[in-house]
Amino acid sequence: MVVAVTGDGVNDSPAIKKADTGIAMGTGTDVAKDAADMVILNDDFSSIVQGIEEGRLVFDNLKKVVAYTMCSNIPEVIPFILFIIVQFPLPLSPILIITI
């Protein structure tokens, strides 16, 4: 379970620091802002939901980019690894790959 705590005062700082995600309001004290993981500048609670949705979208896109990069680069690297480990002959030289 993930716990998020919101607060804006000095008395909220220990709970904000202890929570999995501490959220401070923009008009709150500097102590609360320093203890928080996220600061909401417009003091609107709907911003938390929008921020979480945006963060999940970024995380999903990042997973897709990593999967695409791994799928496209592994077939290019395997012949060179085999050449180094097993002395397997290279089908194409590095210069030829660059020119293609």
Image: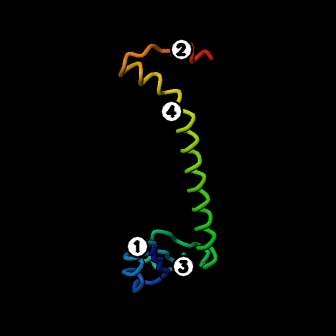
Please identify, in this view, whether the residue under mark 2 or under mark 1 is nearer the observer: 2
Secondary structure beneath label 1: helix
Percent from the top left, x then y, of residue 34? 42, 71
Of the image marks 3 and 1, the number of the one nearer the N terminus: 3
Q: Sort mark 1 into few (<14), some (14-19) or many (20+) by Cα contacts within 10 Å.
A: many
Q: Which mark is residue 74?
A: 4
Q: Residue at position x 58%, y 62% from top?
A: 56
Of the image marks 2 and 4, the number of the one nearer the N terminus: 4
Q: Sort mark 2 into few (<14), some (14-19) or many (20+) by Cα contacts within 10 Å.
A: few
Q: Sort mark 4 into few (<14), some (14-19) or many (20+) by Cα contacts within 10 Å.
A: few
Q: Residue at position x 35%, y 22% from top?
A: 85
Q: Which mark is residue 35?
A: 1
Q: Residue at position x 61%, y 15% from top?
A: 99
- Mark 1: amino acid: Ala
Please identify, in this view, whether the residue under mark 1 or under mark 4 is nearer the observer: 4
Please identify, in this view, whether the residue under mark 3 or under mark 1 is nearer the observer: 1
Asked where in the image residue 98 lies, by quadrant, the reply is top right
Percent from the top left, x then y, of residue 95? 53, 13
- Mark 3: amino acid: Thr
On screen, residue 96 versus residue 21, left or right, reads right
Secondary structure beneath label 3: loop
The residue carrying mark 2 is 92
The residue carrying mark 3 is 27
Gap between marks 3 and 1, in whole Å? 14 Å
Gap between marks 2 and 4, in whole Å? 16 Å
Gap between marks 2 and 1, in whole Å? 56 Å
Gap between marks 1 and 4, in whole Å? 42 Å
- Mark 2: amino acid: Leu
- Placement of the C terminus among the 4 image quadrants: top right
On screen, residue 80 versus residue 50, left or right, reads left
Q: Residue furthest bottom?
A: 11
